[in-house]
Amino acid sequence: MSSIKIECVANEGYRIGESPVWDEKESALLCVDITGRKVCRWSSVTGQVQAISVDAPVSSVALRKSGDYVITLGTRFAALKWKEQLVTTITHVDKDKPNNRFNDGKVDPAGRYFAGTMAEEIRPAVLERHQGSLYTLFSDLSVVKHFDQVDISNGLDWSLDHKTFFYIDSLSYSVDAFDYDLQTGKIGNRRSIYKLEKEESIPDGMCIDTEGKLWVACYDGGRVIRLDPETGKRLQTVKLPVDKTTSCCFGGKDYSEMYVTSASDGMDKGWLSRQPQAGGVFKITGLGVKGVPPYPFAG
């Protein structure tokens, strides 16, 4: 094992930092602050953060093949033009659930945008249960609902052979796998591959490395854990200097750096003074593994 180094590259105090995505063209990390209602971009070249404010909670961001980005905003899929700071609605979901919002989202290997919803939280991880659903936005801009009864739709990624979809509904305290059809985007045969231990707390965002192992950020657990989806075993734990770690992705020139987002919502003054980097974005180097570049939305 090489020596692992953790640094806070953007101490922005995000309320709920989420959805880190590496943008190779810009040598930058994208992420969102859900309750802060902004899409952010940290340049690895300048070290500066740019942010675009939006009119609703923004829960995920993804690259788009035609340039710029797509986001999940409130209960909408939307397009974001960065330079123009222009947001255009693509389509609406959960119209019958005014208290819902999107949560995590990610683009699959075929260029479809998977994202799920949840009820608005009363306070962190406290909400009306079973209100969410998992959706896919196709490149023709049509939407399919896969299933409902979701509590907090969260981390998602795909196996290296594109035959398995991994998914987290946070309050199940489980990482689940589905059979996945790359051609159609259909999923089925759901099963649990890992149950979180008490001190790992709540499973949140997730990504996969080039060895096919999953990395899961543990909300209130202050760590990311590496799992083997074949054996269901935890292989590694990396602790961070903040409790509310929310999501993770690989980035940097060769995708050998891991970026981890965090939150500060729900922390009182004493807690924040003990963890002044809460809501920051962290870079982890020396993990000795690389990640898979993000797929762009094909629509």
Image (tube, rainbow, N blue to C red):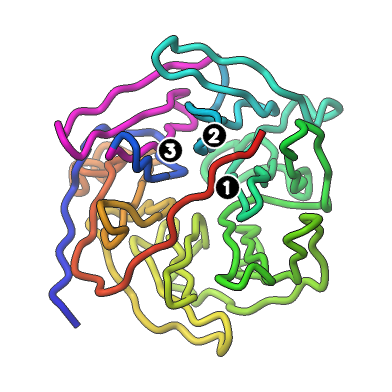
Choose the circle earlier in sequence order: 3 or 1.
Answer: 3
Magenta span contains residue 183: no
Residue where numbered disc 3 is placed: 16
Name the foreground residue: 266 vs 225.
225
Tag on residue 106?
1
| Crowd around label 1: few <14 · some 14–19 · many ≥20 (10 Å) | many
Residue at 56%, 90% (x, y): give it: 231
Callout 3: helix, strand or loop? loop
Residue where numbered disc 2 is placed: 64
Q: Closer to us: mark 3 or mark 2? A: 2
Label 2 to label 1: alpha-carbon separation: 11 Å
Label 3 to label 1: alpha-carbon separation: 17 Å
Q: Is residue 115 visible?
A: no
Q: Position of residue 167 (x, y in %)?
A: 64, 62
Quarter of the image that includes the N terminus: bottom left
Residue at 23%, 34% (x, y): give it: 43
Query: Magenta stretch: dominant SS?
Result: strand
Q: Closer to us: mark 2 or mark 1? A: 2
Q: Amino acid at mark 1?
A: Lys
Q: Quadrant of residue 177?
A: bottom right
Q: Is residue 186 visible?
A: yes
Q: Amino acid at mark 2?
A: Arg
Residue at 37%, 40% (x, y): give it: 23
Residue at 32%, 58% (x, y): give it: 255
